[in-house]
Protein backbone atom coordinates (compact mmCIF):
# COMPACT_ATOMS: atom_id res chain seq x y z
CA UNK A 1 0.00 0.00 0.00
CA UNK A 2 1.20 3.49 -0.80
CA UNK A 3 1.98 5.59 2.27
CA UNK A 4 -0.27 8.53 2.97
CA UNK A 5 2.32 11.22 2.38
CA UNK A 6 3.30 9.75 -0.98
CA UNK A 7 -0.31 9.39 -1.96
CA UNK A 8 -0.95 12.99 -1.03
CA UNK A 9 2.04 14.28 -2.95
CA UNK A 10 0.91 12.33 -5.96
CA UNK A 11 -2.63 13.61 -5.56
CA UNK A 12 -1.34 17.18 -5.38
CA UNK A 13 0.84 16.86 -8.44
CA UNK A 14 -2.00 15.23 -10.33
CA UNK A 15 -4.69 17.61 -9.14
CA UNK A 16 -4.39 19.79 -12.22
CA UNK A 17 -4.18 16.82 -14.53
CA UNK A 18 -6.98 14.58 -13.36
CA UNK A 19 -9.63 17.01 -14.56
CA UNK A 20 -11.45 16.59 -17.82
CA UNK A 21 -8.97 18.82 -19.64
CA UNK A 22 -6.15 16.52 -18.61
CA UNK A 23 -3.84 16.37 -21.58
CA UNK A 24 -4.04 19.94 -22.79
CA UNK A 25 -3.86 21.36 -19.27
CA UNK A 26 -0.81 19.39 -18.27
CA UNK A 27 1.30 19.60 -21.36
CA UNK A 28 1.39 23.36 -21.77
CA UNK A 29 2.74 24.36 -18.40
CA UNK A 30 5.92 23.44 -16.63
CA UNK A 31 4.44 23.49 -13.14
CA UNK A 32 1.84 20.93 -14.16
CA UNK A 33 -1.13 22.98 -13.03
CA UNK A 34 -2.11 24.27 -16.46
CA UNK A 35 -2.46 27.76 -15.00
CA UNK A 36 -1.02 30.87 -16.60
CA UNK A 37 1.54 32.53 -14.27
CA UNK A 38 0.77 35.98 -15.71
CA UNK A 39 -2.95 35.58 -15.08
CA UNK A 40 -2.30 34.18 -11.58
CA UNK A 41 -0.22 37.25 -10.76
CA UNK A 42 -2.90 39.61 -11.99
CA UNK A 43 -5.53 37.66 -10.07
CA UNK A 44 -3.54 37.95 -6.85
CA UNK A 45 -3.77 41.74 -7.05
CA UNK A 46 -7.50 41.57 -7.74
CA UNK A 47 -8.09 39.14 -4.88
CA UNK A 48 -6.17 41.34 -2.44
CA UNK A 49 -6.93 44.88 -3.55
CA UNK A 50 -9.87 45.15 -5.97
CA UNK A 51 -13.17 46.53 -4.69
CA UNK A 52 -15.02 46.50 -8.04
CA UNK A 53 -16.11 50.00 -7.04
CA UNK A 54 -17.99 48.76 -3.95
CA UNK A 55 -17.12 52.02 -2.17
CA UNK A 56 -20.48 53.24 -3.42
CA UNK A 57 -22.02 50.83 -0.90
CA UNK A 58 -19.54 50.74 2.01
CA UNK A 59 -18.93 54.51 1.90
CA UNK A 60 -21.95 56.20 0.35
CA UNK A 61 -24.64 53.89 1.74
CA UNK A 62 -23.22 52.35 4.94
CA UNK A 63 -20.94 55.32 5.79
CA UNK A 64 -18.31 52.96 7.19
CA UNK A 65 -15.60 55.56 6.59
CA UNK A 66 -17.16 57.72 9.33
CA UNK A 67 -17.33 54.79 11.73
CA UNK A 68 -13.71 53.82 11.11
CA UNK A 69 -12.42 57.37 11.30
CA UNK A 70 -14.10 58.07 14.65
CA UNK A 71 -14.46 54.79 16.48
CA UNK A 72 -12.22 52.02 15.17
CA UNK A 73 -8.74 52.12 16.68
CA UNK A 74 -6.37 49.26 15.75
CA UNK A 75 -7.11 47.38 18.97
CA UNK A 76 -10.83 47.40 18.16
CA UNK A 77 -10.11 46.42 14.54
CA UNK A 78 -8.00 43.45 15.66
CA UNK A 79 -10.68 42.45 18.17
CA UNK A 80 -13.29 42.09 15.41
CA UNK A 81 -10.81 39.94 13.49
CA UNK A 82 -9.35 42.39 10.97
CA UNK A 83 -5.75 41.55 10.05
CA UNK A 84 -2.70 43.72 9.42
CA UNK A 85 -0.20 42.84 6.69
CA UNK A 86 3.37 43.52 7.88
CA UNK A 87 4.75 43.40 4.34
CA UNK A 88 2.93 46.70 3.67
CA UNK A 89 4.52 48.42 6.67
CA UNK A 90 7.78 50.39 6.32
CA UNK A 91 10.45 49.29 8.87
CA UNK A 92 10.13 52.53 10.85
CA UNK A 93 6.41 51.90 11.37
CA UNK A 94 7.13 48.35 12.53
CA UNK A 95 9.65 49.56 15.12
CA UNK A 96 7.35 52.36 16.24
CA UNK A 97 4.58 49.82 16.88
CA UNK A 98 7.10 47.64 18.72
CA UNK A 99 8.30 50.49 20.93
CA UNK A 100 4.79 51.76 21.58
CA UNK A 101 5.51 55.10 19.86
CA UNK A 102 2.53 54.44 17.58
CA UNK A 103 -0.68 54.16 19.57
CA UNK A 104 -2.89 51.19 18.89
CA UNK A 105 -5.79 52.82 20.71
CA UNK A 106 -6.07 55.84 18.42
CA UNK A 107 -8.39 55.66 15.37
CA UNK A 108 -5.88 57.89 13.53
CA UNK A 109 -3.52 54.90 13.52
CA UNK A 110 -6.18 52.84 11.70
CA UNK A 111 -6.39 55.59 9.10
CA UNK A 112 -2.58 55.54 8.80
CA UNK A 113 -2.62 51.75 8.33
CA UNK A 114 -5.32 52.09 5.65
CA UNK A 115 -3.21 54.72 3.93
CA UNK A 116 -0.39 52.14 3.78
CA UNK A 117 -2.86 49.57 2.38
CA UNK A 118 -1.99 47.34 5.34
CA UNK A 119 -5.45 46.30 6.57
CA UNK A 120 -6.19 42.98 4.85
CA UNK A 121 -9.31 43.18 2.67
CA UNK A 122 -10.11 46.82 3.46
CA UNK A 123 -9.22 49.43 0.87
CA UNK A 124 -9.18 53.04 2.02
CA UNK A 125 -8.61 56.31 0.23
CA UNK A 126 -6.95 58.77 2.56
CA UNK A 127 -6.73 62.46 1.68
CA UNK A 128 -5.36 65.46 3.43
CA UNK A 129 -8.35 67.55 4.55
CA UNK A 130 -7.49 70.77 6.39
CA UNK A 131 -4.03 69.48 7.26
CA UNK A 132 -5.28 66.14 8.59
CA UNK A 133 -5.19 62.67 7.02
CA UNK A 134 -8.84 61.79 6.50
CA UNK A 135 -10.48 58.59 5.31
CA UNK A 136 -12.70 59.71 2.44
CA UNK A 137 -13.56 56.37 0.75
CA UNK A 138 -13.57 52.79 1.96
CA UNK A 139 -14.38 49.50 0.26
CA UNK A 140 -13.77 45.79 0.77
CA UNK A 141 -11.98 43.08 -1.24
CA UNK A 142 -12.14 39.28 -1.40
CA UNK A 143 -9.21 39.10 1.02
CA UNK A 144 -11.40 40.43 3.84
CA UNK A 145 -13.03 37.04 4.32
CA UNK A 146 -10.67 34.68 2.48
CA UNK A 147 -7.23 35.74 3.76
CA UNK A 148 -5.65 35.83 7.16
CA UNK A 149 -2.10 36.44 8.42
CA UNK A 150 0.47 34.16 10.08
CA UNK A 151 0.59 36.20 13.35
CA UNK A 152 4.38 36.40 13.02
CA UNK A 153 4.49 39.92 14.46
CA UNK A 154 1.65 39.70 16.96
CA UNK A 155 -1.82 38.22 17.04
CA UNK A 156 -3.60 39.46 13.93
CA UNK A 157 -0.44 41.08 12.52
CA UNK A 158 1.85 39.23 10.11
CA UNK A 159 2.29 37.98 6.57
CA UNK A 160 -0.72 37.31 4.34
CA UNK A 161 -2.07 33.79 3.93
CA UNK A 162 -4.36 34.08 0.91
CA UNK A 163 -7.17 31.57 0.57
CA UNK A 164 -7.16 30.80 4.30
CA UNK A 165 -10.60 31.71 5.63
CA UNK A 166 -10.58 34.42 8.27
CA UNK A 167 -12.38 32.57 11.05
CA UNK A 168 -11.74 35.40 13.52
CA UNK A 169 -13.51 37.96 11.39
CA UNK A 170 -16.82 39.12 12.81
CA UNK A 171 -18.26 40.50 9.57
CA UNK A 172 -21.72 40.83 11.07
CA UNK A 173 -20.49 42.93 13.99
CA UNK A 174 -18.54 45.15 11.57
CA UNK A 175 -21.54 45.74 9.28
CA UNK A 176 -23.73 46.40 12.33
CA UNK A 177 -21.51 49.41 13.19
CA UNK A 178 -23.02 51.24 10.23
CA UNK A 179 -25.21 54.19 11.25
CA UNK A 180 -27.37 53.58 8.19
CA UNK A 181 -28.99 50.30 9.24
CA UNK A 182 -32.28 49.80 11.11
CA UNK A 183 -32.09 48.00 14.50
CA UNK A 184 -33.78 44.86 13.12
CA UNK A 185 -31.00 44.37 10.54
CA UNK A 186 -28.31 45.13 13.12
CA UNK A 187 -29.75 42.43 15.39
CA UNK A 188 -29.37 39.84 12.62
CA UNK A 189 -25.82 40.93 11.77
CA UNK A 190 -24.83 40.89 15.43
CA UNK A 191 -26.15 37.32 15.80
CA UNK A 192 -23.65 35.77 13.37
CA UNK A 193 -20.41 35.74 15.35
CA UNK A 194 -16.81 35.29 14.19
CA UNK A 195 -16.04 33.35 11.00
CA UNK A 196 -19.67 33.32 9.87
CA UNK A 197 -21.50 35.15 7.11
CA UNK A 198 -24.88 34.69 5.44
CA UNK A 199 -24.48 35.36 1.71
CA UNK A 200 -28.22 35.07 1.03
CA UNK A 201 -29.77 37.08 3.89
CA UNK A 202 -30.02 40.25 1.81
CA UNK A 203 -32.25 38.41 -0.69
CA UNK A 204 -34.42 35.97 1.27
CA UNK A 205 -34.33 37.65 4.69
CA UNK A 206 -33.54 34.29 6.34
CA UNK A 207 -30.89 34.15 9.02
CA UNK A 208 -28.62 31.09 8.63
CA UNK A 209 -24.98 32.12 8.58
CA UNK A 210 -22.36 29.99 6.84
CA UNK A 211 -18.83 29.24 7.87
CA UNK A 212 -16.45 31.31 5.69
CA UNK A 213 -14.81 28.55 3.63
CA UNK A 214 -11.27 28.31 2.28
CA UNK A 215 -10.67 29.69 -1.21
CA UNK A 216 -7.82 27.21 -1.75
CA UNK A 217 -7.72 23.60 -2.95
CA UNK A 218 -10.35 24.15 -5.64
CA UNK A 219 -8.37 23.15 -8.74
CA UNK A 220 -10.26 20.38 -10.54
CA UNK A 221 -13.51 20.88 -8.61
CA UNK A 222 -16.39 21.90 -10.83
CA UNK A 223 -19.11 22.49 -8.25
CA UNK A 224 -18.58 25.65 -6.25
CA UNK A 225 -19.96 26.51 -2.78
CA UNK A 226 -21.32 24.05 -0.23
CA UNK A 227 -24.43 23.64 -2.35
CA UNK A 228 -22.56 23.38 -5.66
CA UNK A 229 -24.41 26.35 -7.12
CA UNK A 230 -21.76 27.18 -9.73
CA UNK A 231 -19.80 25.09 -12.21
CA UNK A 232 -16.75 27.27 -11.74
CA UNK A 233 -15.24 29.69 -9.25
CA UNK A 234 -16.12 32.62 -11.51
CA UNK A 235 -19.84 32.02 -11.06
CA UNK A 236 -19.63 32.57 -7.31
CA UNK A 237 -17.07 35.37 -7.54
CA UNK A 238 -19.53 37.30 -9.68
CA UNK A 239 -22.29 36.54 -7.17
CA UNK A 240 -20.30 37.72 -4.16
CA UNK A 241 -18.62 40.62 -5.96
CA UNK A 242 -21.90 42.07 -7.19
CA UNK A 243 -24.51 41.02 -4.64
CA UNK A 244 -22.56 40.89 -1.35
CA UNK A 245 -19.59 43.24 -1.73
CA UNK A 246 -21.91 45.43 -3.82
CA UNK A 247 -19.29 45.95 -6.52
CA UNK A 248 -20.24 47.10 -9.98
CA UNK A 249 -21.49 44.57 -12.52
CA UNK A 250 -24.47 42.30 -12.91
CA UNK A 251 -25.56 38.88 -11.69
CA UNK A 252 -28.54 36.84 -12.87
CA UNK A 253 -29.67 33.51 -11.45
CA UNK A 254 -33.09 32.30 -12.56
CA UNK A 255 -32.95 29.32 -10.15
CA UNK A 256 -33.07 31.61 -7.10
CA UNK A 257 -34.59 34.66 -8.76
CA UNK A 258 -31.57 36.83 -7.92
CA UNK A 259 -31.11 39.58 -10.50
CA UNK A 260 -28.82 42.49 -9.75
CA UNK A 261 -27.63 45.12 -12.18
CA UNK A 262 -25.22 47.69 -10.84
CA UNK A 263 -23.56 49.43 -13.80
CA UNK A 264 -20.92 50.04 -15.02
CA UNK A 265 -19.60 46.48 -15.33
CA UNK A 266 -16.23 46.55 -13.59
CA UNK A 267 -16.17 42.91 -12.52
CA UNK A 268 -16.58 40.87 -15.75
CA UNK A 269 -13.15 41.55 -17.28
CA UNK A 270 -11.46 40.73 -13.95
CA UNK A 271 -13.10 37.35 -13.33
CA UNK A 272 -10.78 35.09 -15.39
CA UNK A 273 -7.63 36.29 -13.59
CA UNK A 274 -9.37 36.23 -10.21
CA UNK A 275 -10.36 32.61 -10.76
CA UNK A 276 -6.88 31.65 -11.98
CA UNK A 277 -5.38 32.96 -8.73
CA UNK A 278 -7.73 30.94 -6.56
CA UNK A 279 -7.05 27.80 -8.58
CA UNK A 280 -3.33 28.35 -7.95
CA UNK A 281 -3.81 28.27 -4.17
CA UNK A 282 -3.09 24.82 -2.78
CA UNK A 283 -4.48 23.60 0.50
CA UNK A 284 -1.77 23.99 3.16
CA UNK A 285 0.00 20.80 4.25
CA UNK A 286 -0.42 19.82 7.91
CA UNK A 287 2.35 21.18 10.17
CA UNK A 288 5.10 18.72 11.04
CA UNK A 289 4.19 16.65 14.09
CA UNK A 290 0.53 17.68 14.05
CA UNK A 291 -0.74 14.10 13.66
CA UNK A 292 0.34 10.56 14.43
CA UNK A 293 1.37 8.94 11.10
CA UNK A 294 0.83 5.34 12.21
CA UNK A 295 -2.67 6.10 13.53
CA UNK A 296 -3.41 8.10 10.35
CA UNK A 297 -2.38 5.10 8.26
CA UNK A 298 -4.89 2.95 10.16
CA UNK A 299 -7.47 5.75 9.92
CA UNK A 300 -7.06 5.68 6.14
CA UNK A 301 -8.37 2.11 6.21
CA UNK A 302 -11.32 3.19 8.37
CA UNK A 303 -12.05 6.00 5.88
CA UNK A 304 -12.17 3.53 3.00
CA UNK A 305 -13.72 0.69 4.98
CA UNK A 306 -15.89 0.71 8.11
CA UNK A 307 -16.44 4.48 7.96
CA UNK A 308 -17.74 4.36 4.36
CA UNK A 309 -16.37 7.86 3.90
CA UNK A 310 -14.82 7.19 0.49
CA UNK A 311 -18.22 6.39 -1.02
CA UNK A 312 -18.75 10.18 -1.29
CA UNK A 313 -15.28 11.60 -0.53
CA UNK A 314 -13.83 9.94 -3.64
CA UNK A 315 -10.55 10.23 -5.50
CA UNK A 316 -7.60 12.54 -4.99
CA UNK A 317 -9.84 15.56 -4.32
CA UNK A 318 -11.94 13.62 -1.78
CA UNK A 319 -15.20 14.55 -3.44
CA UNK A 320 -17.68 13.19 -5.96
CA UNK A 321 -18.84 16.77 -6.62
CA UNK A 322 -17.99 16.65 -10.31
CA UNK A 323 -20.38 13.73 -10.74
CA UNK A 324 -23.28 14.48 -8.43
CA UNK A 325 -24.60 16.40 -5.42
CA UNK A 326 -26.38 14.99 -2.37
CA UNK A 327 -29.83 15.66 -1.02
CA UNK A 328 -30.07 17.11 2.50
CA UNK A 329 -31.37 13.83 3.96
CA UNK A 330 -28.10 12.07 2.98
CA UNK A 331 -26.02 14.75 4.69
CA UNK A 332 -25.29 14.76 8.43
CA UNK A 333 -25.07 18.52 9.00
CA UNK A 334 -28.79 19.29 9.05
CA UNK A 335 -30.98 20.32 10.84
CA UNK A 336 -29.48 23.78 10.93
CA UNK A 337 -28.70 25.36 14.33
CA UNK A 338 -31.02 27.92 15.94
CA UNK A 339 -34.02 26.77 13.94
CA UNK A 340 -32.66 28.23 10.69
CA UNK A 341 -34.19 26.84 7.48
CA UNK A 342 -32.20 24.28 5.47
CA UNK A 343 -29.36 26.12 3.72
CA UNK A 344 -29.79 23.85 0.70
CA UNK A 345 -33.41 24.98 0.41
CA UNK A 346 -32.19 28.56 -0.03
CA UNK A 347 -29.69 27.67 -2.75
CA UNK A 348 -29.91 27.19 -6.50
CA UNK A 349 -29.42 23.39 -6.38
CA UNK A 350 -31.31 22.53 -3.14
CA UNK A 351 -28.49 19.98 -2.62
CA UNK A 352 -25.11 19.73 -0.90
CA UNK A 353 -21.72 19.16 -2.43
CA UNK A 354 -19.45 16.56 -0.81
CA UNK A 355 -16.83 18.84 0.74
CA UNK A 356 -13.23 18.49 -0.47
CA UNK A 357 -11.05 17.55 2.51
CA UNK A 358 -7.49 18.77 1.82
CA UNK A 359 -6.31 21.25 4.47
CA UNK A 360 -9.02 20.22 6.96
CA UNK A 361 -6.61 20.70 9.88
CA UNK A 362 -6.52 24.42 9.09
CA UNK A 363 -10.17 25.41 9.18
CA UNK A 364 -12.39 24.30 12.07
CA UNK A 365 -15.34 24.46 12.64
CA UNK A 366 -16.70 22.02 10.06
CA UNK A 367 -19.74 21.60 7.82
CA UNK A 368 -21.45 24.47 6.00
CA UNK A 369 -23.05 25.73 9.20
CA UNK A 370 -20.09 25.06 11.52
CA UNK A 371 -22.05 22.57 13.63
CA UNK A 372 -18.97 20.36 14.22
CA UNK A 373 -16.41 22.26 16.29
CA UNK A 374 -13.65 19.67 15.84
CA UNK A 375 -12.75 16.67 13.69
CA UNK A 376 -13.72 14.48 16.66
CA UNK A 377 -17.19 16.04 16.45
CA UNK A 378 -17.31 15.33 12.71
CA UNK A 379 -16.49 11.66 13.23
CA UNK A 380 -18.92 11.29 16.15
CA UNK A 381 -21.67 12.92 14.08
CA UNK A 382 -21.16 10.48 11.20
CA UNK A 383 -20.90 7.55 13.60
CA UNK A 384 -24.20 8.42 15.26
CA UNK A 385 -26.23 9.58 12.26
CA UNK A 386 -25.05 6.86 9.86
CA UNK A 387 -25.11 4.11 12.53
CA UNK A 388 -21.50 3.13 11.80
CA UNK A 389 -20.73 1.64 15.25
CA UNK A 390 -17.05 2.53 15.01
CA UNK A 391 -14.89 1.55 17.98
CA UNK A 392 -13.15 4.23 20.05
CA UNK A 393 -9.87 3.20 18.41
CA UNK A 394 -11.30 3.44 14.89
CA UNK A 395 -12.72 6.89 15.60
CA UNK A 396 -9.41 8.14 17.01
CA UNK A 397 -7.51 6.74 14.00
CA UNK A 398 -9.96 8.29 11.56
CA UNK A 399 -9.47 11.68 13.22
CA UNK A 400 -5.67 11.35 12.82
CA UNK A 401 -6.18 10.54 9.15
CA UNK A 402 -8.39 13.61 8.64
CA UNK A 403 -5.71 15.75 10.33
CA UNK A 404 -3.18 14.44 7.79
CA UNK A 405 -5.03 15.57 4.66
C1 LIG B 1 -18.14 38.87 3.65
C2 LIG B 1 -17.34 37.67 3.54
C3 LIG B 1 -16.98 37.22 2.13
C4 LIG B 1 -16.41 37.96 1.12
C5 LIG B 1 -16.03 39.43 1.12
C6 LIG B 1 -16.17 37.04 0.05
N1 LIG B 1 -16.60 35.79 0.39
FE1 LIG B 1 -16.29 34.12 -0.66
N2 LIG B 1 -17.50 33.09 0.60
C7 LIG B 1 -18.04 33.58 1.77
C8 LIG B 1 -18.97 32.60 2.31
C9 LIG B 1 -19.75 32.70 3.61
C10 LIG B 1 -18.98 31.52 1.40
C11 LIG B 1 -19.79 30.21 1.53
C12 LIG B 1 -20.97 30.24 0.60
C13 LIG B 1 -21.68 28.92 0.45
O1 LIG B 1 -21.05 27.85 0.59
O2 LIG B 1 -22.88 28.94 0.14
C14 LIG B 1 -18.03 31.85 0.36
C15 LIG B 1 -17.69 31.01 -0.70
C16 LIG B 1 -16.66 31.25 -1.57
C17 LIG B 1 -16.12 30.29 -2.50
C18 LIG B 1 -16.56 28.84 -2.65
C19 LIG B 1 -15.55 27.89 -2.06
C20 LIG B 1 -15.89 26.45 -2.34
O3 LIG B 1 -15.44 25.59 -1.57
O4 LIG B 1 -16.60 26.15 -3.31
C21 LIG B 1 -15.14 30.92 -3.21
C22 LIG B 1 -14.28 30.33 -4.30
C23 LIG B 1 -15.09 32.28 -2.73
N3 LIG B 1 -16.01 32.45 -1.73
C24 LIG B 1 -14.27 33.28 -3.25
C25 LIG B 1 -14.46 34.64 -3.00
C26 LIG B 1 -13.92 35.71 -3.81
C27 LIG B 1 -13.01 35.56 -5.00
C28 LIG B 1 -14.36 36.88 -3.26
C29 LIG B 1 -14.19 38.27 -3.81
C30 LIG B 1 -14.88 38.48 -5.07
C31 LIG B 1 -15.12 36.51 -2.08
N4 LIG B 1 -15.21 35.16 -1.99
C32 LIG B 1 -15.63 37.42 -1.17
C33 LIG B 1 -17.72 34.81 2.33
C34 LIG B 1 -17.13 35.86 1.64
C1 LIG C 1 -23.41 10.51 1.63
C2 LIG C 1 -22.13 11.12 1.24
C3 LIG C 1 -21.09 11.30 2.33
C4 LIG C 1 -20.51 10.36 3.16
C5 LIG C 1 -20.78 8.85 3.19
C6 LIG C 1 -19.56 11.06 3.98
N1 LIG C 1 -19.57 12.38 3.68
FE1 LIG C 1 -18.44 13.81 4.59
N2 LIG C 1 -19.48 15.23 3.59
C7 LIG C 1 -20.47 15.01 2.65
C8 LIG C 1 -21.09 16.26 2.32
C9 LIG C 1 -22.25 16.43 1.34
C10 LIG C 1 -20.45 17.24 3.09
C11 LIG C 1 -20.78 18.74 3.14
C12 LIG C 1 -21.75 18.93 4.27
C13 LIG C 1 -21.93 20.36 4.65
O1 LIG C 1 -21.38 21.25 3.99
O2 LIG C 1 -22.62 20.61 5.63
C14 LIG C 1 -19.44 16.57 3.86
C15 LIG C 1 -18.59 17.21 4.77
C16 LIG C 1 -17.59 16.58 5.48
C17 LIG C 1 -16.62 17.26 6.30
C18 LIG C 1 -16.56 18.75 6.55
C19 LIG C 1 -15.63 19.47 5.61
C20 LIG C 1 -15.55 20.93 5.85
O3 LIG C 1 -14.82 21.61 5.09
O4 LIG C 1 -16.19 21.47 6.77
C21 LIG C 1 -15.78 16.30 6.80
C22 LIG C 1 -14.57 16.53 7.69
C23 LIG C 1 -16.27 15.02 6.32
N3 LIG C 1 -17.37 15.23 5.52
C24 LIG C 1 -15.70 13.82 6.65
C25 LIG C 1 -16.35 12.60 6.40
C26 LIG C 1 -15.97 11.35 7.02
C27 LIG C 1 -14.83 11.19 8.02
C28 LIG C 1 -16.84 10.40 6.57
C29 LIG C 1 -16.93 8.95 6.95
C30 LIG C 1 -17.14 8.70 8.38
C31 LIG C 1 -17.75 11.08 5.63
N4 LIG C 1 -17.42 12.40 5.58
C32 LIG C 1 -18.77 10.45 4.95
C33 LIG C 1 -20.82 13.79 2.12
C34 LIG C 1 -20.50 12.57 2.70
Image (cartoon, rainbow, N blue to C red):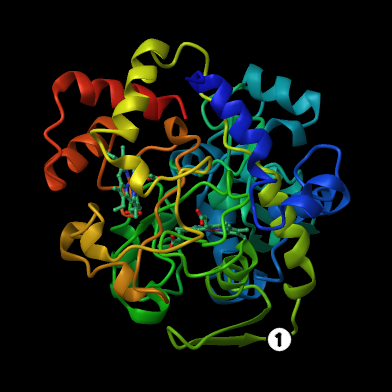
Q: Which residue is mark 1?
A: 263
Q: Where residue 169 sits: x, y (%)? A: 46, 46
Q: Where residue 331 sits: x, y (%)? A: 26, 56
Q: Where residue 19 sits: x, y (%)? A: 64, 53
Towards the viewer: 260 or 33: 33
Is 359 positioned to the left or the right of 188 in the image?
A: right
Towards the viewer: 389 or 150: 389
- In the rendered image of this protein, does residue 229 appear above or below residue 39? below
Q: Report the label total.
A: 1
Is 257 positioned to the left or the right of 248 in the image?
A: left
Q: Quadrant of residue 264?
A: bottom right
Q: Which residue is at a point 21% across and 66% down the rendered structure image?
A: 340
Is 182 positioned to the left or the right of 259 in the image?
A: left
- In the rendered image of this protein, does residue 196 appear above or below residue 401? below
**Residue 110 visible here:** yes
Q: Which residue is at a point 45% across and 88% down the rendered structure image?
A: 257
Q: Quadrant of residue 110?
A: top right
The 10 Å Cα crowd at callout 1, few under 14, some 14 to 19, many 20 or more, is few
Q: Which residue is at a point 32% across and 58% down the rendered structure image?
A: 190
The response on whether ligand 1 sits within 8 Å of label 1 is no
Q: Which residue is at a point 50% across and 37% down the rendered structure image?
A: 358
Towards the viewer: 365 or 303: 303
- In the rendered image of this protein, does residue 150 appear above or below residue 207? above
Specify the farthest residue to the front.
1
Secondary element under disc 1, as helix, strand or loop, is loop
Towards the viewer: 118 or 401: 401
Q: Where residue 403 sits: x, y (%)? A: 40, 26
**Residue 399 visible here:** no
Q: Quadrant of residue 151?
A: top right
- In the rendered image of this protein, does residue 383 appear above or below residue 369? above
Amino acid sequence: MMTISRARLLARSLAGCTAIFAVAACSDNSNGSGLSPALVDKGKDIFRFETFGDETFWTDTLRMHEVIEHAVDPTTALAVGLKVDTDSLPPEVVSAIQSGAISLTDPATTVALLKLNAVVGVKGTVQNVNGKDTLVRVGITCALCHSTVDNSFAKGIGKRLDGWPNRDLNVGAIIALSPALPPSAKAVYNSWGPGMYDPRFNFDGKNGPQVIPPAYGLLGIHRITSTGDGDDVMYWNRYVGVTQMHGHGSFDEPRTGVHVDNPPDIISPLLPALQEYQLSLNAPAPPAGSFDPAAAERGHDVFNGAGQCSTCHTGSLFTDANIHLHSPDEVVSEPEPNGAPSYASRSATKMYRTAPLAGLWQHPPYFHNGTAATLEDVVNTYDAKKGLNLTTQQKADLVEYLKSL
